[in-house]
Amino acid sequence: MEPRPRSFYILAAIFGLFLLFLYGPTITIAILSFQGPTGGLTFPMRGVSLHWFRDLFQQQAVGDIWGAFGRSTALGLMVMVTTVVVSVMGGLAFRKKFAGSGVLFQLVVASLVIPSILVSLGVGLIFSQAGLPVHWASSGFGAQLTWTLPFGLLIMFAVFNRFNPAYEEAARDQGATAWQTIRHVVLPIIAPSLIGVALFGFTLSYDEFARTLLTAGSHNTLPLEIYGMTTNVTTPVIFALGTLTTAFSLVVIAVFLVTVWVLGRRRARAGSDAGRGV
Amino acid sequence: MDRLLKSPNVTGWLLASPLALVLAAFLVLPIVMIVIVSFWTATEFSIVPAFSFENYDFLLGSPVTYSVFLNTFKYAAITWAVTLVLGFTVAYFLAFHVRSQAWQTALFLLCTIPFWTSNIIRMISWIPFLGRNGIANSTLISWGVIDQPLEWLLFSDFSVILAFVHLYTLFMVVPIFNTMMRIDRSLLEAASDAGASGFQTLWNVILPLTKPGIMIGSIFVITLVMGDFITVRFMSGSQAANVGRLISNDIALLQYPSAAATAVVLLITVLITISALLRLVDIRKEL
């Protein structure tokens, strides 16, 4: 192997600093959340304890964190399933040249670039003028979909651009119906990417603040609850919450990655045995 | 019937209908509603359907509006420039200097992980860093660089832009990395065989070929920054304003028609900016 040029070391150093910049603050609050009972929001640490985590679980000072967590998780799962199903259907639709597909695509791009607060404001106005109560599972759910669906659809575009239609042709030649082709050929091939869409859908929803602000109704989701805490909580309990939610996100990513890995292994086992001899 | 079902128009719209319905109900209709309400008036208790230019008159006649819009552009421009340089550098390192694919995937994943955790938490996490008694100040003091804590580290334009860069650089890295990975490596060999230096290859080969990724990343960063209100509110300690904050303040005061008028002006600004950028790139081809 040829030796590394000097630029490699400079760029590697920049990359290292970038990672430090990304992770440094989060690691800092993770450390600070273990402050002793008399510790504050900054260093120095006054002892090490689980005091602030206990505070979080006692639930008196800090509002309805666990209710909000439950709602955010439920909403995240709803958005996730809807995003996967609608994105796959949309992705399949855009492979055909149907009349009006250009307009629909521009609408998808618009959905991505229109500022979140406008969606939030507009949906809130419609519900109030129609006399419907805003609720996280109705207006909040719809408002979040305008953010997760474009991402899901763009991923599907990328997937189908790399998809080899010869597999479908082969299935059709064997007499498979359109549905059988999708069910037994297309879906298994794109399955790992669907996990990516699902991960996007869940975490975008789980973390969505601006679109949920005016559409969640009287019961807060977790980001709204955290936002409320930032304005009136001045103890490390908020760092403890940050540490826990970050840890939860990491667990979610890990679960998804393991699923992708397992799917990949299953596919490798169940895939073609061409070239392996008898 | 059978022929009807085989027509790409029918099946296409059947498959696309859930998507179209969601966007119609939760994007098109709300935007139409905002435009309508922007011509309404408000009393202290409710909004009144009546046609008037009052909101726009007030908005466009106020010098505050212009300074706030200017501030919004300032944040967008600075954040765009910083995330572009940083994002390009990071993507370039990953795509061209990391040789094994396993390392590439691992390092790329490492960059994306913070993206999955809460934005607000990531903002809060700057406080122990930048505060008056924060890590940055105490380090600088103990090194003897400064005698007194720097006041402008937190709750300033500096901290706002720092948070933007922290939150959104990834939106630049991902599309740029994606286009860089699809550059035919033999082009780089050809450039070096033809006697180009590393920098010449970067400037004349890689940069032009990466343009689509740069455009997509720019669209993300610019729209996210222009529509933001929470980062500016939080990181400026409520001392700076952008258009998003103007809207959210009006909403907090239940001045919906006024918020709607500001929203319409913001929407027009964003759409003009984006359509200008989209002229330079065809998104569908680049995925």
Image: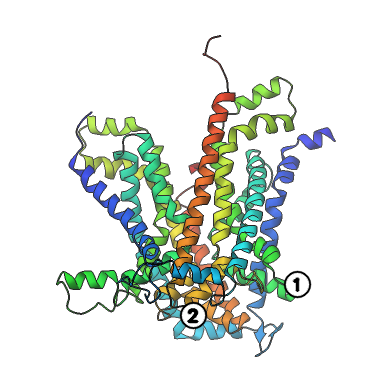
Res A132 label: 1
Label 2: element kind:
helix
Q: Is residue B72 visible?
A: yes
* Kind of residue at badge 2: Asn
Q: Residues within 10 Å of mark 1 (few under 14, many from 20)?
A: few
In this picture, is A175 found above or below B27? above
Q: Residues within 10 Å of mark 2 (few under 14, many from 20)?
A: few
Say which quarter of the image contains residue B187: top left
In this picture, is A10 found above or below A122? above
The subunit letter for the residue under badge 2 reads A
Q: What count of labels does the image hold?
A: 2
Q: CA distance from mark 2 to mark 1?
A: 31 Å
* Kind of residue at badge 1: Leu
The subunit letter for the residue under badge 1 reads A
Mark 2 vs mark 1: tell me if same chain. yes
In this picture, is A222 found above or below A155? below
Find residue A182 and report its horizontal and vertical position in percent.
Answer: 68, 33
Residue at image point 51% right, 72% down: A227
Residue at image point 50% right, 46% down: A254
| Residue that badge 2 annotates | A232
Q: Mark 2 or mark 1, which is nearer to you?
A: 2
Say which quarter of the image contains residue A66: bottom right
Q: Are marks 2 and 1 in contact (CB under 8 Å)?
A: no
Please, which residue is most extreme toward the left here? B144
Find residue A166 and report its horizontal and vertical position in percent.
Answer: 60, 25
> From the image, which quarter does the N terminus of chain B lie in?
top right
A169 left or right of A269 in image:
right
A224 left or right of B119 in image:
right
Please, which residue is most extreme toward the top here? A278
